[in-house]
Image (cartoon, grey):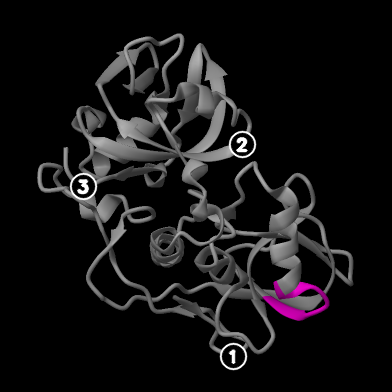
Amino acid sequence: MIKHTGMAGPVSSVIVRPILRGCASLPACAASLFALACIGSADAADCVLERQGEGRVATVVDARSFRLEDGREIRLAGIERTGTDRTGGRAALSAIVAGREVTLHGEDDSPDRYGRQSAFVFVAGSELSVQMELLRRGEALISSDIAEKNCAAALAAAERTARDAKLGIWAETSAIKNTESPGDILAAIGQFTVVEGRVLSVRQAGAITYLNFGRNWTQDFAATIPRRIIPAFENAGLRPKLFENRRIRVRGVVSSRGGPRIEVLRVGQIEVLGGN
């Protein structure tokens, strides 16, 4: 778990090292799917992020953002909300941070194109980041944009704890979409979503590799991997063809090009599940 040191220095995290479920036939998998893999042996590691400021929370904007009294808008790094229950997500964040003094930690304090600073956030007096609190309560999903592997693994562990306990969003059977019901996935267009199913085939068409979960490309779900991303998979020992006939989870924003699609831009968006 990610802990606050209580000093004006980096954040320290003690995590459980992720390992890939059912991965014996996929060489070097454990090193690659760090963000979303099953949590296994208890090896300690550090998630070191620089302190990037502090302030008092004035207003909670939405389920992932709040504004400080000095006017800065802060976006919680490393997590996403599902498209459903947006009001509940905002209420969950408000219950933790509203009116509280917080410290900000991250790799960079530069604002994004919307003027928001992305950060790991700690409420004064708490050793756990706000992200960890939300994840372990089942009030958020881990995103795939955390470059620091140990930080990503710590968040993945918290999410899995809530998922196994069916807390928050995980209490709903629809929290993970099934590829055998593409209509349910299409209903989540534009939303960050977790989708699970068996890859029936892996095909390349032009600059795109398709992980196909059905036989009808105009209706069934597919995950797409752009050519420029393939080297990242290969460097991790994960040629896309190895996903064929495997059961996997894919997370990302749903779009529609014929059938529902999720574009895979990072290795961490895919989790290989146990068994065939």
Q: Quadrant of residue 195?
A: top left
| Residue at x 42%, y 41% (from the top left corner) | 266
Q: Which mark is residue 111?
A: none
Q: Amino acid at mark 2?
A: Gln
| Residue at x 25%, y 22% (from the top left corner) | 200
Q: Which mark is residue 6?
A: 1
Determine whether, in the image, residue 77 is placed left or right of residue 239.
Answer: right
- Where is residue 25 drawn, in percent x and y? 10, 42
Task: Using the rendered image of the protein, determine whether residue 91 is visible from the camera's viewpoint.
Answer: yes
In the rendered image, the vertical position of residue 129 relative to residue 77, given as above or below? below
**Magenta stretch holds residue 71:** no
Determine whether, in the image, residue 193 is placed left or right of residue 118.
Answer: left
Query: What element does badge 2 sit on?
Result: loop
Disc on the earlier residue, 3 or 1: 1
| Residue at x 52%, y 39% (from the top left corner) | 193
| Residue at x 79%, y 51% (from the top left corner) | 115
Q: Nearer the viewer, residue 266 or 214?
A: 214
- In the rendered structure, which segment of residues is drawn in magenta? 96-103
Marks 3/2: CA–CA distance: 27 Å
Marks 3/1: CA–CA distance: 39 Å
Determine whether, in the image, residue 228 is placed left or right of residue 252.
Answer: left
Q: Which residue is mark 3?
A: 274
In the rendered image, the vertical position of residue 39 relative to residue 175, given as above or below? below
Disc on the earlier residue, 2 or 1: 1
Q: Nearer the viewer, residue 38 or 178?
A: 178
Q: Are marks 3 and 2 in contact (CB under 8 Å)?
A: no
Query: What element does badge 3 sit on?
Result: loop
Q: Quadrant of residue 222?
A: top left
Q: Which residue is mark 2?
A: 191
Task: Using the rendered image of the protein, determine whether residue 63 is visible from the camera's viewpoint.
Answer: no
**Magenta stretch holds residue 101:** yes
